[in-house]
Image: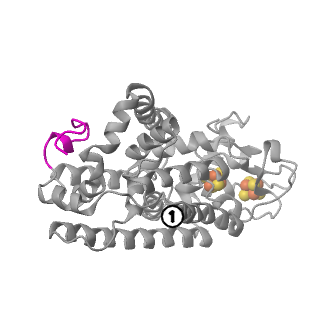
Amino acid sequence: MFGRISHGLTPEERTRRARHVLHARPRRPLRVRQAVQFGTVAIIIYIGLCFVRWVHGLERGVTDGARSPGVEGFLPIASLISLRHWVETGVVNMVHPAGLMILCLILLTALLLKKAFCSWICPVGTFSEYLARASHKVFKRRVKLPKWLDWPLQSIKYLLLAFFAFTIFFVMTREQVAQFLDQPYNRVSDIKMLYFFTHASAATVWVLGILTVLSFAVPYFWCRYLCPYGALLGLVSLASPLKIVRSTSACTNCRQCASVCPSFLDVDLTTTVHSVECTGCLECVVACPESQALQLQPTGLLSRWKVKVRPAVFAVLVAGLFYGGIQVAQLAGVWRGQTDQRELVERVRQGMTGSEYDHVGRPQSNR
Ligand code: SF4
Ligand code: SF4
């Protein structure tokens, strides 16, 4: 499951292989993936600027312009609570419907197309990737923690995921879920998130700085060890029919694939990559010099379809599913929240302080 199997290599072969894998020269990222990543970052910057302008309007008592629903993609916990509410009641809560839709689309992407969200769309993944590339250039090698440290650290993201999932699905009652979704904190959580960054405390700056430094020193530190979202997508992606498949007859054991894999997977030693850490970045496929040796293709029940999914096709599938899904959500009327803007003006003017604006505030008080 985690892609670490005994490959029957002698200690000398293992050392030689590890040296090759860690000291390979950096390669230019897959262009089409880069295009999707940069396009997404541009969209997020645009959405962010519109949102900042809208919030400044609220502060002045102006209610023209629209709230940017895309910002809700950065509210994963509220979206998970909203998902439970939707599953239980069949009703989409309309405070932050876009967050719920984005979460569902990301889960669907993982189910069909592996953890492609992480390596093709997620802005934090993009930031981590370029920090990792900078680290590779500076240190002239890829930094990888020893297994005795790597494995326990990887468990942190699963523990965080278990904590959130257990709390949301088993500790919170149905009534608490409904109350949370409608409480003042949730109604302004996107605005509070903006203030979290624009009015950052010294602690926030320190934490963000430390995470950035760690992600430079140990590539993908956040994604590999801390991100509960990535942990969830990794588990869901196990069901994805698409996998990286190596043909042992066409493979020349050059190890190019392993030397570019950002997740340090033993692509060159396995026939099918089942790992929860495989993000479907396709860097291994494009690095492989043998045209028939390494492919992304359907496996399991769909293995009869001998289709090789090329990077450009995969790009269309990933971007099409994610952005196409957003269009469908808009057409279905489950994208824009329905909170009255005058209510938001009032809440912003009041400063959004008080226990009802705490993360676990008293539900439905002072409304
Ligand atoms: S196995 Fe290939 S597709 Fe998966 S993470 Fe590694 S390089 Fe990317
Ligand atoms: S799959 Fe391709 S890149 Fe990987 S070892 Fe075989 S020939 Fe080399």
Q: Is residue 185 left or right of residue 6?
A: left
Residue 354 inside the magenta-drawn segment? yes
Image position, residue 329 (x, y; %)? 53, 60
Left or right of residue 137: residue 198: left
What quarter of the picture does the C terminus occupy? top left
Q: Is residue 254 among the parts visible in the rendering?
A: no
**Residue 135: quadrant of the picture:** bottom left
- Image height check: is 38 above or below 335? below
Q: Nearer the viewer, residue 152 or 242?
A: 242
Q: Which residue is mark 1?
A: 330
Say which quadrant the N terminus sits in: top right
Instruction: State the residue at coordinates (39%, 56%).
Output: 72
Residue drawn at x 44%, y 61% as measured from the top left: 123
Q: Is residue 356 above or below residue 126?
A: above
Residue 290 appears at what percent x and percent y?
80, 63
**Is ligand 1 closer than 8 angstroms to the Cβ of mark 1?**
no
- Amino acid type indicated by mark 1: Gln
Left or right: where does residue 340 sit relative to residue 136?
left
Q: Which residues are magenta?
A: 353-367
Instruction: Residue at 32% x, 39% y: name it.
Output: 180
Q: Does the magenta stretch mainly form a helix, a strand or a loop?
A: loop
Residue 251 image-quadrant placement: bottom right
- Whether residue 190 is visible here, answered yes or no, is yes
Q: Callout 1: helix, strand or loop?
A: helix
* Disc 1 crowd, CA 10 A, few/some/many (<14, 14-19, 20+): some
Tell me residue 198's x, y (percent). Answer: 21, 62
